[in-house]
Amino acid sequence: MHEMSIAMAVVEQVEEAAGSTGETAVEAVHLQVGELAGVVPDALAFCFELACAGTVLEGAELVAETVPARARCAPCAAEWPVGMPPDLVCPRCGGTQAELLAGRELQITGVRWADRPVPARAHREG
């Protein structure tokens, strides 16, 4: 499950930023996740919670924004939503020289620092 390695990398980067700025707790981490990034949102959220345990991110919320995939046809300049599975054939001219404009993003776009440590989330019994 590569979502765990992604979650651990996010936690590591935010912890580095916290250390360099003297922050002691995080309320939320905002991510952009492209539709074609191959990330399962629920799995990432689960892994993020596990990766945060015992760090300045413990109890932090993961706010993931999905970025729709879009492409542009090189010959006719038409743009279209690619969708899943990706359709890279131009709907206007049938061309196959598509340039992917968006949809592969996987980046931290913001961190909301806390004034005090965030209490750990209560575990729900199911």
Image (spheres, helix red, strand yellow):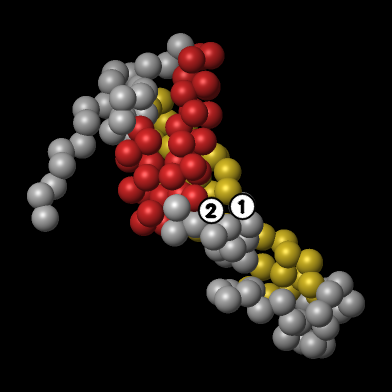
Q: Which part of the image, by quadrant, shows the C terminus? A: bottom left
Callout 2 crowding tier (Cα within 10 Å): few <14, some 14–19, many ≥20: many
Where's residue 31, x and y in %?
Answer: 50, 45
Q: Residue at x 36, y 23 (%)?
A: 56
Query: Which mark is on residue 123?
Result: none
Q: Residue at x 49, y 28 (%)?
A: 12
Q: Secondary structure at mark 2?
A: strand
Where's residue 105, x and y in %?
Answer: 61, 52
Q: Secondary structure at mark 1?
A: loop
| Residue on which disc 2 sits | 33
Q: Which residue is outermost to the left?
A: 125
Q: Quick check: 87 left or right of 107?
A: right
Q: Quick check: 56 left or right of 120?
A: right
| Residue on which disc 1 sits | 105
Which comes before the other along the chain, label 1 or label 2?
A: 2
Tags 1 and 2 in contact by the CB under 8 Å rule? yes
The answer to whether residue 30 is visible is no
Where's residue 50, x and y in %?
Answer: 32, 39
- Along the line of sight, the residue nearer the viewer: 106 or 81: 106
- Residue 96, placed above or below residue 9: below
Q: Residue at x 54, y 60 (%)?
A: 38
Where's residue 112, x and y in %?
Answer: 42, 31
What amino acid is at disc 1? Glu
Q: Residue at x 41, y 50 (%)?
A: 44
- Residue 100, placed above or below residue 63: below
- Residue 124, placed above or below residue 88: above
Q: Which residue is outermost to the right?
A: 75
- Along the line of sight, the residue nearer the viewer: 104 or 75: 104
Q: Which residue is outermost to the front?
A: 1
What amino acid is at disc 2? Val
Callout 1 crowding tier (Cα within 10 Å): few <14, some 14–19, many ≥20: some
